[in-house]
Amino acid sequence: MTDQSEPAPEQTNATVISCGESIDITTVMTWRDKLLEILSVAPDVVFEAESVEKIDTAGLQVLVAFMKDARVKGLSVTWSNPSDVLCRAAMLTGFADVLELPTAV
């Protein structure tokens, strides 16, 4: 996971987060810490998720918690090209709606 301060093309002042290849139990604490930091400073967030090849329930849970907190704070969160793996995992666990991911994969 890398945090880039460049604005996303469709949203100025957005924090762009590259999801990398894996969001799972081995990286969830790093994700949690980074997402908590972003909640306190970012006006809007764009997840670049086209490279996600592995995600488990721990990874989905940290993303769901972030989405809920982001809504409370009024942040706009969007996804840039979410991978089929991510969308399928979210759909199978029932998290696609809360993560605002497409369900047709």
Image (cartoon, grey):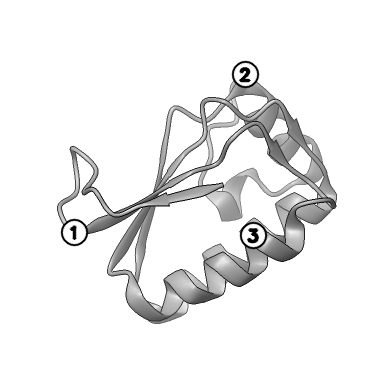
The residue under label 3 is 31
Say which residue appears at 54% left-offset and 66% top-offset.
35
Between the residue at mark 1 and the residue at mark 2, the CA separation in whole angstroms equals 30 Å
How many neighbours does mark 3 have within 10 angstroms: few (below 14), some (14-19), or many (20 or more)?
Answer: many
Q: Which three-letter amino acid code belongs to the residue tagged 2?
A: Val
The residue located at (82%, 43%) in the rendering is: 56
Tell whether label 2 touches label 1 (CB within 8 Å). Answer: no
Residue beneath disc 2: 105
Tag in front: 1 or 2 = 1
Q: Secondary structure at mark 3?
A: helix
Are the residues at dot 1 and dot 3 in contact (C-beta closer than 8 Å)? Answer: no
Query: What is the x, y in percent for residue 26?
Result: 83, 51
Q: Amino acid at mark 1?
A: Asn
Q: Amino acid at mark 3?
A: Trp
Tell me if 80 is positioned left or right of 85 in this view. Answer: left
Q: Which label sits in the foreground, 2 or 3? A: 3
Corner quadrant of residue 19: top right
SS type, badge 1 = loop
